[in-house]
Image (cartoon, rainbow, N blue to C red):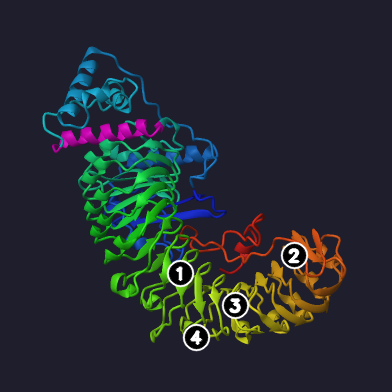
Amino acid sequence: FQFRSTSIMPSRKHKANHARSSWTGEVSPADNMNSIPEDLEVHSTSSNVGHSLPNPDEVERPERSKRTWMLWVAICLFVVAATAIGVELGLQSGNENPRRIHNAGTARDSASDQKRRIRLQRYLVNNEVNTNEEFEDPDSPQSLALDFLALIDEQQLNAPSGDLRSRDGYRLLTRYIMTLFYYQMDGPNWNFDLLFLSDFDTCYWFSLFEPPVGQLGVICNENTNEITGFSFISDNISGELPKELAHLTTLSYIESIGNEVSGTIPDEFERLSNLRTMVFAWNSMSGTIPSWIGNLSRLEFLYLSSNLFTGAVPNQVEKLTNLKVLAFNDNLLNSGINPVWKLPKLEYLFLEDNQFTGQLPQNLGNVASQLINFDVSSNRMVGPLPSDLFELSSLEIVDLHGNAFTGMIPETAITEPSAIKFIALHKNELSEQIPPSLARLEALTHLDLSSNNLIGQIPDLGAMPDLKYLFLGNNNFQEGPIPNYIFTFRQLKELSLKRTQRTGNISPLFGSLDKLVVLDLDNNKLTGSLPTELGTMTDLQFALLNRNFLDSTLPLELSNLSDLRLALFNSNNITGDFSPICALPGLAVAVNDCEETTCDCCQLCCSDNEDCHQYTEIASHDPSWESSYQRTFFDFSTFQRFGVRDVNKQNN
């Protein structure tokens, strides 16, 4: 069965969307199911969040240790108790802490216990885990951990005769370090204690949660009982990471998502040469990305998303030749990104929302041929786009919006079916015409070329049967009618042709686009009447038909648009009574001309040739991989956002 961890928390860049992150791995069913009682239901989970996120089968967690019947019963009792007091096992933020299922115990104070404490301290110092000075403060995490082992812990471990590599030495080391972790990371205030400081063996300091969360806490190899990983998701762990974790050189998987881990990545972590997965996402970590990270040659998955890291990507990153996923997004990083082009196995690259500069390589296939997801949006990148951008055989997501790229949109000469589903190039400085060869990308569901300097005619893009989102607004195209091929996009949910110099009538064929949620034809030269067929678009929520030359009576059929939330008809010659539209239950904003209509619900009425409101933005949303590139809000202005509560009921 699979363990999967998923967390929902707000982005540090204060995006309106909620970020979702997923890391998934498999456990050998043959080994583990033998230790699971038949009456305990264990759910298998699989990912359906889309190809914008790493494939679940590719991010492996280390194997867990075998669980005894007694432990499974304890876990079940914990789940039942937690559920009984209203704790949702989905780690939802805002819940009160669940009742602790154990206490740290009563401290013993016998002479033998005090002597054992002295011997344990001497052992840790002699083996260079800590210094005597670190134990001088009785309230230090080191002292508290030592007190627990010597004076409270029912296991009453003694100082071993062998070094840390011996069986007893390793057992003491792991228990001491995970106890130290508990105290240094504010364990008493965790949302879930995960059986830390319980009488169980350290490998049992974990809890199971309902899918898709899975196992959180300590992760052990079932054959050797070595600690090979730990995972904490939205558990309110806070503080700087203990440097002592570096002594657990068996670690291959470390994960903290949605916590308050602060400080820098300890330099001592360079010793964790077995690490394959390092995840510190949605925390409060700072400092620079250390150059020694390039020495962790086994790393395959590196996520440092949504922190406060500064500085440049160190050149030593290019030494991570096994890396498949690199996520440095939503930090304060700057300089160029050349080191990432030396990673031959890279499949997922997330660098958005930083301050990166420089140009992209002109032949992307020569340096990143295995890319599946390519996201460097909202940075300061310049120069032309790679000439082979749309010809990488595995590429599915291309998000380069919010930079200063110039030149033409690349042609594509592909003859095989393309895997590309998502292209976002808006808010750049791209020029020339849209290449007709884009129509060869038949798998596209999302195409956003808005807010560039594109010219010429809008080419025929009619070979995209699955297209759901088309944004071409705010460009300098030649005048012309709304292309008829648009009406073949029967899956279309959002269309923006704002300020694209469209002329002619609004076709009755719009009525065939019955999944359309956004229709943005603002600021064109459209004429004629409003077709009554618009009233059949019952999913329509946002109608922006303002700033045209429409000459029409308001069709009564528009009162059928029960989901309508924004209606902009101003700066036309539309007459009639708005009362039927005002009666729509979800209508939040309505704007029309003062002289032509009666509108009791209109927040604003405009005089001809007057810009009387600020609903002028193209709602080509700021997509993010954390939300699987799905829309999370609508923003047609800088001061108001519309949620997606109703949109989620639409077909995705």
Give amino acid for label 1.
Phe
Mark 2 lies on a secondary structure that is loop
Q: Nearer the viewer, mark 4 or mark 2?
A: 2
Q: Earlier in the sequence, mark 4 or mark 2?
A: 4
Return the x and y of residue 561 as percentages of the image width and height: 75, 69
- Whole-Å distance between the Cαs marked 1 and 4? 20 Å
Q: Say which amino acid is labelled 2.
A: Asp
Q: Earlier in the sequence, mark 3 or mark 2?
A: 3
C-alpha gap between disc 1 and disc 2: 31 Å
Horizontal and vertical percent for residue 72?
36, 42
Circle 4 sits in a helix, a strand or a loop, which is it? helix
Residue that mark 3 sits on: 476
Work out which residue is located at the far top of the displayed protein and give it: 111
Question: Dot 4, crowdedness within 10 Å: few (<14), some or many (≥20)?
Answer: few
As drawn, the label of residue 611 is 2
Mark sitting earlier along the chain (1/3): 1
On the image, the x and y values in percent for residue 54 come to 38, 62
> According to the image, label 1 marks what residue?
405
Main secondary structure type of the part rendered in magenta:
helix
- From what the image shows, is residue 563 above or below residue 489? above
- Estimate the spatial distance between the alpha carbons at disc 1 and disc 3, rounded to whole Å: 17 Å
**From which residue to which does the magenta span run?**
165-187
Residue type for callout 3: Asn
Residue 355 or residue 90, whichever sits in front: 355
Among the two numbered marks 1 and 4 on one chain, the one whose residue lies closer to the N terminus: 1
- Are there few (<14), some (14-19), or many (20+) residues within 10 Å of tag 3? some
Residue to which mark 4 is pinned: 436
User: What is the spatial separation of the Cα atoms under label 3 and label 2, in whole angstroms?
Assistant: 21 Å
Q: Describe the element under mark 1 as helix, strand or loop.
A: strand
